Amino acid sequence: MEAISKDTLRIIDANLNRIGEGLRVLEEIARLSLNDAYLTQRLKNVRHDIVRVDNSLQQKLINARDSDGDVGADMLVSGETKPRDTRDTVIANARRAQESLRVLEEIARVPDLKLDTGKYKNTRFSLYSIEKELLLKVSRQDKLSKLTGLYVIIDTTWLKGRSHEEVTAQVIRGGARVIQLRDKDGNKKELLSMARDIRNMCLEKDILFIVNDYLDIALAVDADGLHVGPEDLPVGVARQLLPSDKILGGSARTVDSAAALSAEGVDYIGVGSMFPTGTKEGAEVVGIERLREIKEAVSTPIVAIGGINENNIKDVINTGADAVAVISAVLGADDIEKATRQLANAFEGERDE
């Protein structure tokens, strides 16, 4: 080890530090922003493994360190000081660690330096995968932050001969924040075309688009998410098949079923029916008090649904619903845009008070 130059030791020390710093930032995002135990543990393991060197080398690295004499310490790169969102922070720190790993791959080839170049290479490729997964989950978190306000379900049985595109346009102009497409009995080929049209309209206006029940349709049109009911695809299966950037919603009528859904990994829970409704035959009315109980029992966002209209929406909002889903209150109106706007304004106005 005596043959190793001070300059080489400084390169090793600087890059081990950069790797540790970058990985620690990613670990904190996984832990405190995404609440992802698996990625947090994976990043922690990588960080501890990669920065660990034997005591003899560690002491040489510290002795060779010269922070005050580092000519790059005060160098600024264009754009480096600009504000970053979570996505930018993940990319910046993943690149920071990946670049330093590449440096150590090459430095490890120095004769008499007992470092494993393959270890740094394998870690670099592993980090590419971790970075991708982090970015997908950050994207899902960003989508979930938009799950608020009026959630309009376009049930094809309520189109009644009207164009799905025109109905969607009116709903969007009226201020809907989330649109779900629901069709229990239609032709899948026609539904795919309809879903694609609505997805494009929502994408243009930055509105969340959710597909009810059909995972294949949701994947085919790159919807923002999928909603499944108790008789649909099991939540665990849906979560496994959905990409990590997609929202998954489930339906609950009881505190226990809501808690189970939350534990299974849904991103939001639809709770209803709040009031008697003509859009779902035989729907059980759970009422406002049940909504309050579920809201207190789980931290997962809640979407209230069932019989909600202009006369009772404020009661639902005041109970703590994060979003309010409607069908007939909008699609049953003569002026869909006006009906949507009234409900959307009621939600926003109540939240602002």
Image (cartoon, grey):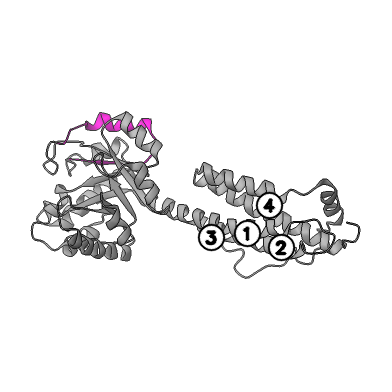
Q: Residue at x 61, y 58 (%)?
A: 93
The amino acid type of the residue labelled 4 equals: Gly
Q: Position of residue 295 (x, y in %)?
A: 34, 34
The amino acid type of the residue labelled 3 equals: Asp
Whole-number angstrom distance, CA of label 2 to CA of label 1: 9 Å
Please identify the quadrant where the N terminus is shown.
Answer: bottom right
Sort mark 2 into few (<14), some (14-19) or many (20+) by Cα contacts within 10 Å: many
Mark before the other along the chain sequence, 3 or 2? 3
Image label count:
4
Q: Position of residue 120 (x, y in %)?
A: 68, 58
- Mark 1 or 3: in front is 1
Mark before the other along the chain sequence, 1 or 4? 4
The magenta-colored residue range is 283-306
Element assignment for label 1: helix
| Magenta stretch encompasses residue 14 | no
Sort mark 3 into few (<14), some (14-19) or many (20+) by Cα contacts within 10 Å: few
**Label 2 close to label 1 by CB (< 8 Å):** yes
**Label 3 close to label 4 by CB (< 8 Å):** no
In this rendering, the answer to whether 282 lies above or below 145 is above
Q: Quick one: 65 or 131, which is closer to the camera?
A: 131
Which residue position is annotated with label 2? 105
Q: Position of residue 167 (x, y in %)?
A: 17, 60
Whole-number angstrom distance, CA of label 3 to CA of label 2: 26 Å
Residue 328 bears which disc, if any? none
Which residue position is annotated with label 1? 124
Q: Is residue 158 left or right of residue 266?
A: left
Element assignment for label 3: helix
Q: Quick one: 121 or 302, which is closer to the camera?
A: 121
Which residue position is annotated with label 3? 88
Q: Residue at x 18, y 32 (%)?
A: 285
In this rendering, the answer to whether 50 lies above or below 98 is above
Q: Quick one: 117 or 23, which is closer to the camera?
A: 117
